[in-house]
Amino acid sequence: MTKRGSLALRVLTLIATLTMLFANVAPALAAVPASPAQATDPRFFPQTGYRIDNDQFWDYFQKRGGINNFGYPVSRTFTFLGKTVQFFQRRILEIEPDGSVGQMNLLDNSLMPYTHINGATFPATDTALIKSAPAVGSPGYATKVIAWIQQVAPDAFNNLPVNFFKTFYNTVSLKQAYPNGGGSPSFIPLLDLEMWGLPLSAPAVDPNNHNFIYQRFQRGIMHYDNTTHTTQGILLADYLKAIITGTNLPPDLAAQAQASPFYKQYNNSKPKGLNNPAALPNTDMTNAFEPQSPAATPVGPAPTTTSGLRYGFAVHMFYQDQQRVLNLVKGAGFSWIKQQIRWADMEPSKGNINWGLLDPIANIAQANGVKVLFSVVTAPSWSRSDGKIDGPPNNLNDLGDFLAALAQRYDGKVQAYEVWNEQNFSREWGGGTINAGAYVELLKVAYHRIKAVDPNIIVVSGALTPTGVNDPNVAIDDAVFLDQMESYQNGVFKTVADVVGVHMSGYNNAPQDWVDYHTVNTPGFKNHPSFYFRRIDQLHDIMVRHGDTRQMWITEYEWAAATPPVPAGYEWTTHLTEQQVGDFFVQSIQMIQQSRPWVGAIFIWNLNFRTFLDYHTNETALFGIINPDWTPRSIYIKLAQMKK
């Protein structure tokens, strides 16, 4: 059975050894490397697959705080209610009648009057509060309105440092707004007013989560999270897009928006991209939400788009309803499974292989047209002088014999083999210090024995776990370990595996987030690249630096949502909702589809572990996307509905 103890250890060790982490990680890994798209076209954002084409929007975006204030673009430029607009995650830019750039009042009753979104309860518009604001155009309006905002948007509420006015007042800096100089500090409050509009409510505590305090403005909702003591804006325009497209639409928001003229309007196969054009006059959404490519510029071509990405689930087939498992795999539009094979269990004595457990898996997968990745781990006690199993055999040829026997018996039924798992972690490489060269030597033997049976079988190097720790007795940072494998014996690693295996754990962070950029208010797991989806970009950069052109296969790909109690060390799985986790999976896969052609396969961790284990006590089950009664969680449904 696949073990997730590595996650628990890495969580605890990372927190305890923060200083060591940054001291040992190579300086080259300090930031996400620019993708080819970013290098050739700064207006294109591969994180979402959209470009800021309009020159006025691009200038405004840069001079009003960029990604931090707008998020990424999530639409093309199109005509919306008579205006030229572009949607960003937090805001909607529009061209005003006088030709200037402005922002839509997202919280107007005609757009987003809603108070329940994705499990959060926001304060409703308070008409009495609005009437108390200074009258527009009255003498001294600019000074009066800022003073009024400071009064109704306090920095302290319920004895908590919500920092609503401080957040308002620090939205745009003078340097951002006037990069060439010439601005006056007196302009800043009005620029901030331009970004947020007026408060529409007083601060209010979320009745379902007293750590969350919200305040409604015309163009956004401020969110204070008392668990992290941070204040930032909700991604409201993303939710309006969800209403319009029907994709990633939270059920509570859908229930409120069903009577809206925007509800599930987008249909790019219809004239003007609308299901009901009469409900949205002066609107043309043709291609509005279809991903774009970088502009073709003299400095370089657009990157190759992903083709042939393999979609798989990590599954547990032993002693399970195997047909039911495969039905779920195919029902999601996936065509691969990964099954871990514990060599220690399959060959209790030399040459005595338990085919009775393995044959049914290979046979039923072939009958269903599902491809198989066997991930082979552990060594039988008879193969090691210390009698332990969590580590390589003394004689590497013993592993070679086992893999050759598997390859021979299942030729044509099992298409790929992953040779070991998380060998940069002591729990998986026991009995000695962690050593990249020692692993490559094991891989050499395995590769040649498998290829001798059938050169078409795909050999995947053992996937590395993102530990962030550099202690050869405990764990080696995955980026450091990959660099060591690539450097070993002048790059022999490139000749002894067809693809490079890695693991991805997004923890409680959104796929577009990074060490210095956060879009979700979740506690902890922010201070090292190991906690983020975009860690895979750093690993790929190392491969490129070594001239390694092979694909990367992500053989465990995970986010999780759970309710307490959960096993110790996994409390972070309670920070996200199922809705968020499903969205993160889909968004990250779309990021791969659009701008990471070097990813050849993803295996979601995991499909069915909740059907036979209790996630309250077993960490492997935390990640299952099927309920104990075999019904699909919303995570599974989102993956099934995702465009492949």
Image: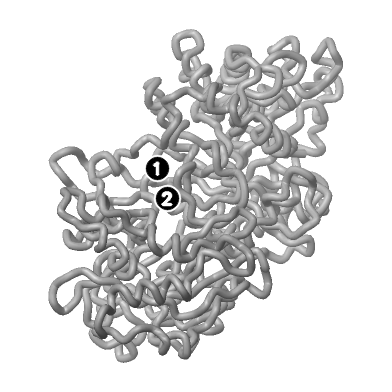
Q: From this viewpoint, is residue 246 visible?
A: no
Q: Residue at x 63, y 65 (%)?
A: 159
Please state which of residues 38 and 400 is positioned toward the viewer in this rendering: 38
The image quarter containing residue 77 is bottom left
Residue 209 position within the rendered picture, expressed as x and y whole percent measured from the top left: 67, 68
Question: From the viewer's perspective, is residue 148 above or below residue 633?
Answer: below
Q: Quadrant of the N terminus?
A: top right
Relative to 352, is 235 on the left or the right? left
Identify the residue under disc 1: 596
Q: Earlier in the sequence, mark 2 or mark 1?
A: 2
Q: Amino acid at mark 1?
A: Arg
Q: Residue at x 15, y 54 (%)?
A: 182
Q: Amino acid at mark 2?
A: Met
Residue 526 position within the rendered picture, expressed as x and y whole percent measured from the top left: 55, 43
Q: From this viewpoint, is residue 136 visible?
A: yes
Identify the residue under disc 2: 591
Question: From the viewer's perspective, is residue 370 above or below residue 488?
Answer: below
Residue 164 position within the rendered picture, expressed as x and y whole percent measured from the top left: 48, 65
Secondary structure at numbered mark 2: helix
Q: Quick check: marks 2 and 1 in contact, CB under 8 Å?
A: yes
